[in-house]
Image (cartoon, grey):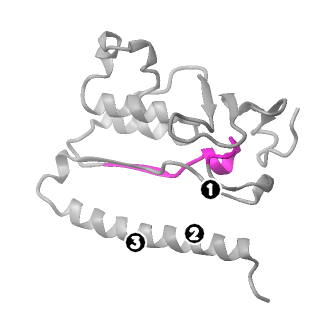
Amino acid sequence: SPMSPIEEMHNHYRNSVLMQERTVADFLKELRALPGWDDTALLFLSDHGEQFREHGGLYHLSSLFEEQVRIPGFFLAGDHAVTPVQRAALATWLPRRTYSQDIHATLMDLLGVYDQRAHFAYADRLVGRSLLRFPPPGEPRVLMSTASGVWEPDDAKYGVMQGDILAVKAESGSWWCYDIRTDPGEHEAR
């Protein structure tokens, strides 16, 4: 039977991702062959997830559901770019939820300025945990939004997440709360 328009769009998206994977893989092969690879660190991070009718939504920047906020990424480094202790710390983050501000903190750590961030202008806004250090106890409270100075959706969503608990409010509606650990599909709002 023929594919629905949503299935065709999802298939086109998957093909785009496959083409990107091949392009990045070719780039990485060439990068690793360069003489400076041992001193190189590479961080690849998508800017958003994508929704294909899960929860009735389509595209991105319209909700704070997992389909849109969980994004792919990876970190590669040559032998001299990070220490064995940093590699060990990075591995401990694999089962944990991380956020874009953690990526920012990790980049600051790679540049050697993470410990000086309290002295930077707007230091109170420089939050995040370096993924090159062992995780601190507890989970941070992270503010989330579908609105920004660049993108203003028709019905902005604002939320806060701590661990697997997400509380969300639509600008036009009421609050919803999800426990992703017990409801990974985010179907049972409380």
Which is in the foreground here, disc 2 or disc 3?
A: 2
In three-dimensional space, the C-alpha distance between marks 2 and 3, rounded to whole angstroms, equals: 14 Å
Q: Is residue 72 a member of the stretch shown in magenta?
A: yes
The local secondary structure at tag 2 comes to helix
Badge 1 vs badge 2, beta-carbon distance below 8 Å = yes
Q: Residue at x 72, y 71 (%)?
A: 6
Residue 22 shows which numbered tag? 3
**Residue type at tag 2:** Tyr
Badge 2 vs badge 3, beta-carbon distance below 8 Å = no
Q: Residue 74 appears at what percent x and percent y?
A: 43, 50
The local secondary structure at tag 1 comes to loop
Q: Residue at x 58, y 37 (%)?
A: 96
In three-dimensional space, the C-alpha distance between marks 1 and 3, rounded to whole angstroms, equals: 20 Å
Residue 13 shows which numbered tag? 2
Magenta residues span: 61-76
Q: Residue at x 40, y 32 (%)?
A: 104
**Residue type at tag 3:** Arg
For disc 1, the marked residue is 50
Q: Residues within 10 Å of mark 2 (few under 14, many from 20)?
A: some
- Relative placement, left or right, of 78 versus 100 is left
- Where 17 sits versus 68, above or below? below
In three-dimensional space, the C-alpha distance between marks 1 and 2, rounded to whole angstroms, equals: 9 Å
**Residue type at tag 1:** Glu
Q: Earlier in the sequence, mark 1 or mark 3?
A: 3
